[in-house]
Image (cartoon, rainbow, N blue to C red):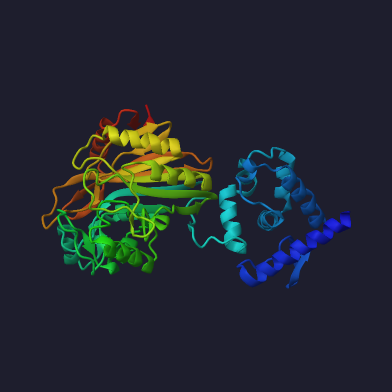
Amino acid sequence: MKQTRHNSFWISVLFLIVIIFTSCEIKQGAFVANRNNGNPFIFSQNDIDSFQKYSDLILKKGTREFFLNYPVDENFLAYVTKECGVSTLKNICKNGNFNDSSLWYKYTGNTMHALWVKYSKNCGVYEYSNTKIKESKTHDKTEAVLEFTGDVNLASDVRTVKFLKDNGNDITKCFSNDLLEEMRRADLFSVNNEFCYTTRGEPIKGKDYIFKADSKDVSLLKNIGVDFVNLANNHTYDCGEVGVLDTLDALDTYDMPYVGAGKNFSDAKKPLYYVLNGRKIAFVSATQIERSLNFTKEATENSPGVIKTLNPDKYVDIIKDASTNADIVIAIVHWGTEGNSFYGEDQVKLAHAFVDAGADAIIGCHSHCLQGVEFIDNVPVFYSLGNYWFSLDDEMPDSYKTGIAKLIIGRDGKIIPYFVPCEFNMGVTKLITDKTEYATDLAYLESLSTSARVDSDGRIIAR
């Protein structure tokens, strides 16, 4: 019986090696003990016996909760062994709790979700081409820093963009140096892309404001450290279907990931996933706006558009699906009333639905001004971050308060929210460094909030 099992095992080994050397980036064998002076990898019989023993036990006793419903088999465990050593399987078996999926992170430094991404990518066993997944390194292995801003507008005919062009089209001149450092230092930095990229699309008739930029301007966002953009807003569709398609093409051409819109509903609803510090994070996005108009079209199975959430059912399903495929879900939403610093009951109702569906943090925008920060079941909700670098027309906007929502994800997977105060003035957004002004801005945000207070360092804490 033992010999039969070994034969079966060697067949699996040979199969995996074939995959490795024909379709995979991995240069090593499955259960490698050492190299022998540059010769092919040597397989230790002790490692083989131990792997067979522990993998058999894990596959026999592991529950669906333990594997998070992934089709774990001997090849997956071979990959884990190659990356982390056979002692990893031994420790899992020694622990003996085959219902606790957190053991994967404890012994490998990666959750099961993250391990499955790495396994799929490196060995090519399962097809992930239809899923938007990125892997990114963090500056600190003990935490991941995510930063979000409100509205950014690169439309060619607004005053801030004319200011940009007057400065040699150097967008770094539109932000203070310390703020640029803050944005670029974040492990992931995202903005609300409040315009479309097109030179072909015709402006929608009857709409007061149309914002469109040239596709090459995507590079401007990359110059200030933007890692991905939100498209679920009420200006992505300013030039109709052609404008949406041109926007998607421009972002793809310049390798700028996006979320919240697509060529059809199936495309638009896809979460954007990132693996950071061994955890898989999902970003999903939708717009509540417009509430009484319908200039901005929702994506259908046959037409491009955005994800909408005036009726939250579809977006709730997207959040639920993302929560089963990721360790953390960040919901981005375009909602509320323009010019109103106080969030409305409609936003609160939607926020509760999103939290119940599995959102671990909510980032809001659209009001063009700051709104409060709250906690719903320990989930931080930034109701609106306001404008970040934005103007409506040919007039330079008055100075306005703005800021960055910073989410720090620790090794324990918990999210610690912060607010980084900023100010826009005469075409430039700057970081607030004056101590008195900094404290005043934090106090103002706290005054807009009821279930949260803001520490002197900008940390958002439940009251």
Instruction: Looking at this view, name the residue that lies furthest to the front.
Output: 302
Foreground residue, 48 or 204?
204
Q: Across the whole image, how many numbered discs are drawn on residues?
A: 0
Q: What is the quadrant of the N terminus in the image?
A: bottom right
What residue is at 50 percent from the left and 52 percent from the top?
276
Q: Eyeballing the image, is 148 above or below 165?
A: above
Q: What is the quadrant of the C terminus in the image?
A: top left
Where residue 74 appears, as percent x and y from the top left, is 72, 55
Horizontally, residue 95 falls left or right of residue 215, namely right
- Decide if residue 253 is in sight here: yes
Where residue 60 appears, as percent x and y from the top left, is 74, 45
Where residue 420 appears, as percent x and y from the top left, is 32, 43
Tell me the quarter of the picture where residue 214 sits: bottom left
- Decide if residue 103 is in sight here: no
Horizontally, residue 4 falls left or right of residue 152, namely right
What residue is at 43 percent from the left and 39 percent from the top?
416
Where residue 443 appears, as percent x and y from the top left, is 26, 33
What residue is at 66 percent from the left and 57 percent from the top?
83
